[in-house]
Image (spheres, rainbow, N blue to C red):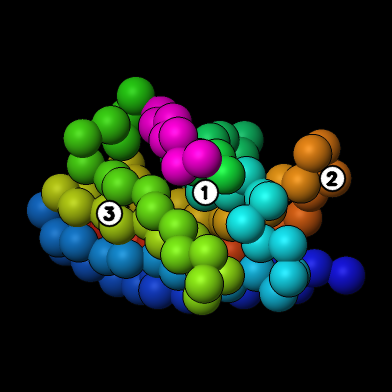
Amino acid sequence: QVQIVESGGGLVQPGGSLRLSCTVSSPYFNMFTLGWYRQAPGLQRDLVAQISTRRTTTYADSVQGRFTISRDDAKRTVYLQMDSLKLEDTAVYYCKADLRGSFAWGQGTQVNVSS
């Protein structure tokens, strides 16, 4: 069973930066499409960014130009660099690993943007 572990969340002021990491325990890591999602209290879980096996990236409009997703297949890790953070970026951020429709979620990491 694939295990997914996120890290890097925390408290940051508006305008600050954080980098989230997600490690996936699978020897087939390079075959996964990887995504970061977030869920704020009372709201649904939404896609933030996604990166394919060919490193094609997709971003939500709300984070375009501020967040960058990347992957290191040798380290079996996907990253989310978050810059120019806003109050509305506060949420639990989840990593999703998708292998041809079979997917798994991490436990989430909390990001709080507050002054």
Q: Nearer the viewer, residue 75 or 115?
A: 75
Callout 1 environment at 10 Å: few (<14), some (14 to 19), or many (20+)? many
For the residues marked 1 and 2, what is the alpha-carbon distance in whole angstroms? 16 Å
For the residues marked 3 and 2, what is the alpha-carbon distance in whole angstroms? 27 Å
Q: Position of residue 111 (x, y in %)?
A: 39, 62
The amino acid at mark 1 is Trp
Which residue is drawn at the image coordinates 19% and 52% (left, top)?
83
Asked if 40 appears above or below 111 in the picture, the reply is above
Q: Is residue 39 visible?
A: no
Quadrant where the N terminus sits is bottom right
Q: Position of residue 82 (x, y in %)?
A: 27, 54
Quadrant where the C terminus sits is bottom left
Which residue is drawn at the image coordinates 73% and 70% (left, top)?
27
Magenta stretch: give its range.
54-60
The amino acid at mark 3 is Met
Circle 3 residue: 82
Q: Is residue 88 magenta?
A: no
Q: Is residue 57 magenta?
A: yes
Which residue is drawn at the image coordinates 28% and 45% (left, top)?
67
The disc placed on residue 36 is: 1
Asked if 11 appears above or below 56 in the picture, the reply is below
Secondary structure type for disc 3 = strand
The disc, 3 or 1, on the residue closer to the chain's N-terminal end is: 1
The disc placed on residue 9 is: none
The disc, 3 or 2, on the residue closer to the chain's N-terminal end is: 3
Callout 3 environment at 10 Å: few (<14), some (14 to 19), or many (20+)? many
Which residue is drawn at the image coordinates 11% and 53% (left, top)?
15
Tell me the quarter of the picture where residue 12 sits. bottom left
Circle 2 residue: 102
Asked if 13 appears above or below 34 in the picture, the reply is below
Horizontal relation, residue 12 to residue 30: left or right: left
Q: Position of residue 4 (x, y in %)?
A: 68, 69
